[in-house]
Image (cartoon, helix red, strand yellow):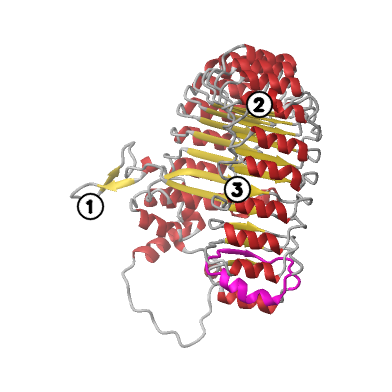
Amino acid sequence: MELAQLCSISRDVYSPACKRARISSSFAFNSEDSNRQPSIEVLPEECLFEILRRIPGGKERGACASVSKKWLMVLSSIRRSEICKPVSGCGDVEMASGESVEELDGCLTRSLEGKKATDLRLAAIAVGTSSRGGLGKLCIRGNSSSSGHGVTDLGLSAIARGCPSLRTLSLWNVPRVSDKGLSAIAKECHSIEKLDLCHCPSITDEGLAAIAGSCPNLSSLSIESCSRIGNAGVQAVAKFCPKLQSLSIKDCPLIGDQGLSALFSSSTAISKVKLQSLNITDLSLAVVGYYGKSITSLVLTGLQFVSEKGFWVMGSAKGLEKLASLVITSCRGTTDLGLEAISKGCPNLKQICLRKCSFVSDNGLMSFTRSAGCLESLQLEECNRVTESGIIGAISNCGAKLKSLSLVRCMGIKDTTAGLSLSSLSQCSSLRSLSIKNCPGFGSLGLALVGNLCPRLQHLELSGLHGVTDAGLLPLLRSCNAGLEKVNLSDCSSLSDEVVSTLARLHGGSLEVLNLDGCRRVTDASLAAIAEHCMFLSDLDVSRCAITDAGIGYLSNANQLNIQVLSLSGCCYLSSKVLTCLKRIGRTLVGLNLQHCNGISSKTVEVLVESLWRCDILS
């Protein structure tokens, strides 16, 4: 450093304070002096590093970080083990040993999203959290549109140096973070327990292997759309992470049978597994079925190269004894044969969800329900080979076990009960929840039969069933002797006031939630019945129903009602005259939907907003 520069620093920093001269005339500055940086900024970073690491207090360090970007970045480059602390009873300072300045438990959580995800903010987090309990969880969700200013290895390295207590790291859409940044985390943060990598194209096997080798406590790993992570990285996890319990891998083309086989054969503690859109074959499912003795939850989605044999071997291997929940979506290898093997090889299976399994038929479903002795929840979505006979047979097979049944868009269901007699079927007295959505073929005959088989229903959802009439639903309502609590009949356009009146009369003492959205034949008579019988109703939706101001009047005059959420969206017969009634109902309301009620003026809505200040009003 030049002598003149040193003199300048000495004069600016160490000169004693003196009274500043008054300047009453113009003063000509030298151009060189006017462009010169403040003297403190010309200090080399090495000198600034030595100065700042001798500031142990969190408050003081935070103040220094606010001086300039340069100071912030230098502070973020100081490891906690490099911070000096005062010696007791002495004004000098000594190096802190490998221990932190204070005990940290990593209790803080920070999240950066979009344009806020930058290296500068990460540096500020590294400095700011060090004295406040330590950073334990960091979530970064980048923005592809601002990738030029997003998080890089520099920011992640600052976190690594300043946050050794980090336990959870989530990186989403950060293309400029590479193995270098992840290796920095691995070098400093040995307490990592959960790692989530999504859309990180610059991270390869090397970065994942670094984490695996330095973080033996890793218990949860999620990898999604990381095109350069392959079998070698997964094998490193298998070798060095014996505590791994949760694994999720999605859309990683380089991860195949070799990596997964090594992982499942080595990691005996894995209990939750999700495999989606991978280039794996029957071999991987065979390994899962044989070695997955601790697996309790298994999700398989879009495995196009797994055949019927893979699912059959997975079930027949008899290793999935603890499996309690199974979800299979869009896997062409799922057939009746594989489903039967799974039911026999998974004795503790309680929940199964089959989505878009086009080769599963009535025979497979009935065989499965006969063998699955612990099944409590069955969900079928777009399984179009399953018919009404298969559904009725499955309900009958489950006897006193099944608690929840859900059918969504199963187009193979037709309203025919040919060949089925009630005397040959067993009641399913355990079923509490029945949900049938957008299955246009499900009609009154099937619903009446279900009602006879399931007398203990409490939650009933029939959505988009235009073929269901009063004649089909009334027997079910009369047979439910446990008291219905939640009922959703949205878009069942053939139902009328008779069903609602019967529902209110028979189940008004237990009914809490009622959704009649889109039931255009429901009129004021239904609201009169609800007002008279449903004393515990808290949520009512009569959107797009044929109700008028008089119907709302019935509700407002029922003193026993305690409605908290009321939806009147699209009720075109309502007018501004309903204001007084809504004010009376509004004493208990916390939510009111008046959208698309064209007969209610904006002025009326304004009065309601002012009067019902506790209530959220949509208009």
Amino acid at the residue labelled 2:
Ser
Residues at marks 3 and 1, CA–CA distance in whole angstroms: 71 Å
Q: Residue at x 50, y 55 (%)?
A: 70
Which amino acid type is shown beneath numbered disc 1? Gly
Q: Is residue 45 visible?
A: no
Q: Which residue is mark 2?
A: 396
Write down the residue under mark 1.
91
* Residue 257 image position (x, y, % from top left): 67, 18
User: Counting other residues with Cα less than 10 Å from the Cα at mark 1, is it few (<14), some (14-19), or many (20 or more)?
Assistant: few
Residue type marked 3: Lys
Q: Residue at x 36, y 57 (%)?
A: 59
Between circles 2 and 1, the one closer to the viewer is 2
Quadrant, the C terminus: bottom right
Q: Which residue is mark 3?
A: 486
Residue 239 on the magenta span: no
Q: Which label is found at residue 611?
A: none
Residue span colored magenta: 574-599
Q: Earlier in the sequence, mark 2 or mark 1?
A: 1
Residue 350 coordinates in the image, percent (x, y): 57, 27
From this view, report whether residue 319 is shown above or below residue 562. Answer: above
Q: Residues within 10 Å of mark 2 (few under 14, many from 20)?
A: many
